[in-house]
Amino acid sequence: MRLSRALATLMVALTATLHCLAIERVRSYTIKDGLADSSPRFITQDSEGILWICTWDGISRFDGGSFESVDNRMSTFFGTTRSVFEAGNGVYWICNHSGINRINLLTGECESFKLGYDKVQQSIEAFIMAVSEGGTVFCTLLDWGICHYNAERNEMVPFNIKDVNTGRIADILCVGEDRLMVREDSGVTSLVRYESGPEGIRVVSSEFVLGKEPISGIFKTDNGIGLVTGGLLHLWDETSETVIKTLRIPTGVFSAGASKGDLASISYRDSKAYEVSLKDGS
């Protein structure tokens, strides 16, 4: 089932007013409609067309007609949920207030991964997840850093990067199979190269993107990776690892970006959003 219209309607109703779109009818969804909570934090669509809505108080799935909450038996996953990633075969990774979690909707199995030193496991709030083309799962943890999933050991292990303040990460983005773009709270962004080994993956090198110029947002487009700095959108080419085009965009406090074809949608924290042509910036 294709839910592109449902996705657009839900995003408008629950997040921002998209001034650049001609919306004929907008419906708001609340707890009364079956939504877990009326304060969504993250929305994504899986391969079956189902919308996953992460809220302050659990996860709801939306098929275009009705909402369904994640099974109550998976009580670990209720609470503040940050993001969801589909791994295939009914398996989903979830970041929430208790850490990193994996559920299987086909079997009903659920598993939590926690990190800690000296074999003392701790619940640490997980924020952002990214998955490489090779299937490596990365996740950021509040005031802790970055970890990655080691399939052989079936555990999350630290991913330490020299000269990067991994305790204060704002965003991560996988570039191909062996690179990770890491944006710190300060805006300083690094490109990290890594390789796989018997103990997992290790960092090979890291370098700053755009020098140390603060970057307020990073997101993937069909024309390269978008780097937002003030009123500019830089298109960064993954092959040459250079900026191939710079476009002027409206200024504001960046919130999120997405792209389809030659159009990029950029939203700001004041609830304004714009569509920008990646060809000429119009």
Image (tube, rainbow, N blue to C red):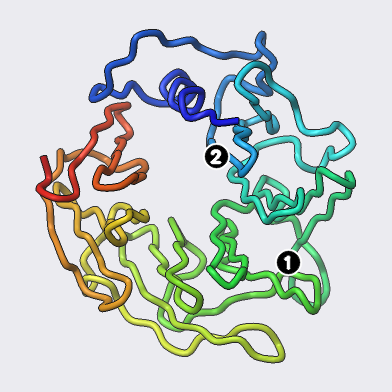
- Where residue 205 sits: x, y (%)? 42, 88
Q: Residue at x 45, y 76 (%)?
A: 179
SS category of the residue bearing label 1: loop
Q: Residue at x 30, y 35 (%)?
A: 268
Give the residue type that dot 2 points to: Thr
Q: Residue at x 65, y 37 (%)?
A: 80
Decide if residue 180 is on the left or right side of residue 281.
right
| Residue placed under numbered mark 1 in the picture | 115
Between residue 100 and residue 238, name the one nearer to us. 238
| Residue placed under numbered mark 2 in the picture | 44
| Position of 282 relative to 154 (above/below) | above
Decide if residue 157 is on the left or right side of residue 26.
right
Q: Can residue 128 be seen?
A: yes
Between residue 152 and residue 40, name the one nearer to us. 152
SS category of the residue bearing label 2: strand
Circle 2 residues within 10 Å: few <14, some 14–19, many ≥20: some
Mark 2 to mark 1 CA distance (whole Å): 26 Å
- Where residue 186 sits: x, y (%)? 33, 60
| Position of 86 relative to 134 (above/below) | above
**Quadrant that contains the C terminus:** top left
Q: Can residue 54 be seen?
A: no
| Position of 248 relative to 63 (above/below) | below
**Quadrant that contains the N terminus:** top right
Kindly give the residue lying farthest to the front in the view shown.
1
- Where residue 100 sits: x, y (%)? 70, 55
- Where residue 8 sits: x, y (%)? 43, 26
Sequence-earlier tag: 2 or 1: 2
